[in-house]
């Protein structure tokens, strides 16, 4: 986990997650989704492009705006970090008393939804222990 997470900053990972979950965006769309100024998104994307994690390409509908797309390497980083974090959360949940586990899992799912991320329907698919 540490080696993959060391490849990107938290902000870069956030941009990769946004692009991975929402699909291709232009710079303004990414900036809006992240709540940052477009100039910050531009610098961020310059670094991601240089690292081979994102590509810029022409927008077929509006040639004034470039489209940002996550590369397969960028998706691999997101997948590796996500899996490592899910495993770490699952390990902690395993150490909780079974009767307390459900409340924590429910709170984590609600937290994900509040953050605009879909909460998984079946947390066991993520390797999290059954909380029923």
Image (cartoon, grey):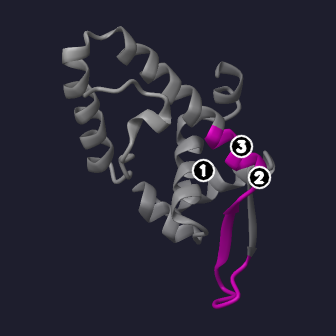
- Report the residue at 24% width, 35% height from top: 106
Quarter of the figure with residue 41: bottom right
Q: Are marks 2 and 3 in contact (CB under 8 Å)?
A: yes
Q: Are marks 1 and 3 in contact (CB under 8 Å)?
A: no
Q: Which residue is mark 3?
A: 76
Q: For the residues marked 1 and 3, what is the alpha-carbon distance in whole angstroms?
A: 10 Å
N-term-proximal mark, 1 vs 2: 1
Instruction: Classify mark 1: helix, strand or loop.
Output: helix
Which class describes the residues within 10 Å of circle 1: few (<14), some (14-19), or many (20+)?
many
Which class describes the residues within 10 Å of circle 3: few (<14), some (14-19), or many (20+)?
some
Q: Which residue is mark 1?
A: 16
Instruction: Classify mark 2: helix, strand or loop.
Output: helix
Instruction: Classify mark 3: helix, strand or loop.
Output: helix
> Does the rendering let one see residue 60?
yes
Q: Nearer the viewer, mark 1 or mark 2?
A: 2
Q: What residue range appears in magenta?
A: 58-79
In the rendered image, residue 75 lying in the magenta stretch gets the answer yes
Quarter of the figure with residue 100: top left
- Report the residue at 69% width, 82% height from top: 59
Quarter of the figure with residue 57: bottom right
Checking the image for residue 72, the label placed there is 2
- Report the residue at 66% width, 85% height from top: 64
Along the viewing direction, whichever of 31 and 110 lies nearer the viewer: 110
């Amino acid at each position: 986990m540490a080696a993959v997470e060391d490849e990107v900053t938290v902000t870069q990972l956030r941009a990769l997650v946004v692009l991975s979950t929402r699909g291709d965006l232009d710079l303004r769309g990414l900036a809006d989704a992240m709540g940052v100024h477009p100039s910050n998104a531009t610098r961020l994307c310059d670094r991601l492009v240089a690292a081979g994690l994102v590509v810029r390409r022409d927008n077929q509908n509006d040639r004034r705006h470039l489209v940002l797309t996550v590369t397969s390497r960028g998706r691999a980083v997101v997948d590796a970090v996500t899996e490592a974090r899910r495993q770490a959360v699952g390990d902690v949940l395993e150490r909780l008393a079974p009767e307390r586990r459900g409340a924590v899992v429910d709170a984590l799912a609600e937290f994900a939804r509040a953050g605009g991320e879909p909460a998984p329907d079946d947390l066991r698919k993520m390797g999290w222990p059954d909380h029923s």
